[in-house]
């Protein structure tokens, strides 16, 4: 189940990922925990061990920016993980009401007649999709949840030849983008945690938003396609993301995508 101590759990999990040998700490006494001990991290971050204990236990949930920066350095967090870490220390607030997909965005999707594109929210629910996206994969039908499809659909594992990497990216993006205090997100995470693969990846506490990356599909009708994914935030509706797939001009993937769209028109 989702926890209300997101900040403390993140610090504890990332502390466990640091090998003591990387910090010349292998001979600092008996080791009964994975990674750094609490006193070791506190010392390297320049804070007291009792204060770090309060952070990890959720007693103190809003450390100062200076403490956050010191811990981010000591935990060796990259830019994405640091941004996520800082967001966990922000005061709790009521999430904004997510607007419906606007008519302008619907028209934009429909104007891309040769380009698969869809809109999802930051919980990975598909909100809208054009015909090319729905022809590319059934998972892009509005009403589907992409995280749920990745971990519970056998068809998706066949569709995505790089499924292990896609699964890792999905979990990292869900942690980075979704509001983990939102009741609907809490319910989704609880459902996903019935998957052993999801539980294993979620325990890593990786946080990385969706990137513009190459994604491979194996379509049952036209075979393999390698498409460049672009992620665009909708202005005025920051909870919505437009995902667009493009094939390199003149490539085999471009030909395959053209055949798919022609045959299905």
Image: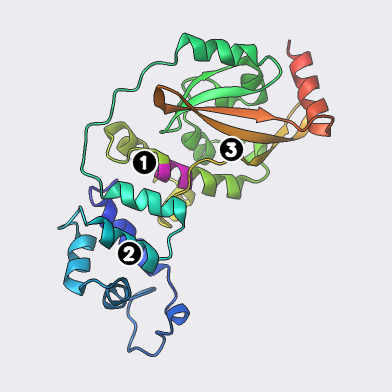
Name the residue carrying label 1: 189
Asked whether residue 175 is drawn in magenta, I would say yes
Q: Position of residue 94 (x, y in %)?
A: 22, 32
Calculate the distance from the C-alpha at mark 2 to the C-alpha at mark 3: 40 Å
Residue 254 drawn in magenta: no
Q: Is residue 93 above or below residue 71?
A: above
Magenta span main SS: helix
In front: label 2 or label 3: 2
**Which part of the image, by quadrant, shows the C terminus?**
top right
Task: Classify residue 265 as left or right of residue 52.
Answer: right
Work out whether residue 155 or residue 9 is closer to the camera in this orientation and state it: 9
Mark number displayed over residue 154: 3
For residue 78, say whether it is visible.
Answer: yes
The residue mark sitting in front, 1 or 3, is: 1
Residue interval drawn in magenta: 171-176
Secondary structure found at label 2: helix
- Give the image quarter of residue 132: top right
Mark positioned earlier in the residue sequence (2 or 3): 2
Residue 169: percent from the left, percent from the top?
Answer: 53, 46
Label ID, residue 77 = none
């Amino acid at each position: 189940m989702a926890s209300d101590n997101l900040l403390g759990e993140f610090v504890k999990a990332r502390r466990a990922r640091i090998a003591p040998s990387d910090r010349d700490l292998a001979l600092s006494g008996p080791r009964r925990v994975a990674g750094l001990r609490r006193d070791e991290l506190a010392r390297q971050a320049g804070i007291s061990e009792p204060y770090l204990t309060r952070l990890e236990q959720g007693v103190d949930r809003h450390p100062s920016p200076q403490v956050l920066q010191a811990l981010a350095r000591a935990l060796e967090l990259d830019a994405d993980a640091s941004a996520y870490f800082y967001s966990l220390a922000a005061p709790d607030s009521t999430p904004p009401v997510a607007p419906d997909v606007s008519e302008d965005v619907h028209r934009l999707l429909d104007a891309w007649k040769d380009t698969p594109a869809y809109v999802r929210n930051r919980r990975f629910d598909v909100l809208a999709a054009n015909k090319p996206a729905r022809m590319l994969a059934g998972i892009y039908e509005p009403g589907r949840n992409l995280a749920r499809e990745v971990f519970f659909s056998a068809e998706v594992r066949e569709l995505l030849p790089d499924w292990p990497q896609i699964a890792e990216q999905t979990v990292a993006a869900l942690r980075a983008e979704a509001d983990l205090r939102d009741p609907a997100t809490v319910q989704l995470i609880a459902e996903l945690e019935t998957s052993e693969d999801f539980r294993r990846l979620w325990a890593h506490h990786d946080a990385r938003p969706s990137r513009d990356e190459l994604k491979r599909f194996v379509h049952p009708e036209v075979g393999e396609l390698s498409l460049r994914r672009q992620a665009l935030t909708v202005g005025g509706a920051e909870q919505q993301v437009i995902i667009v797939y493009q094939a390199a001009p003149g490539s085999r993937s471009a030909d395959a995508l053209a055949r798919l769209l022609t045959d299905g028109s």
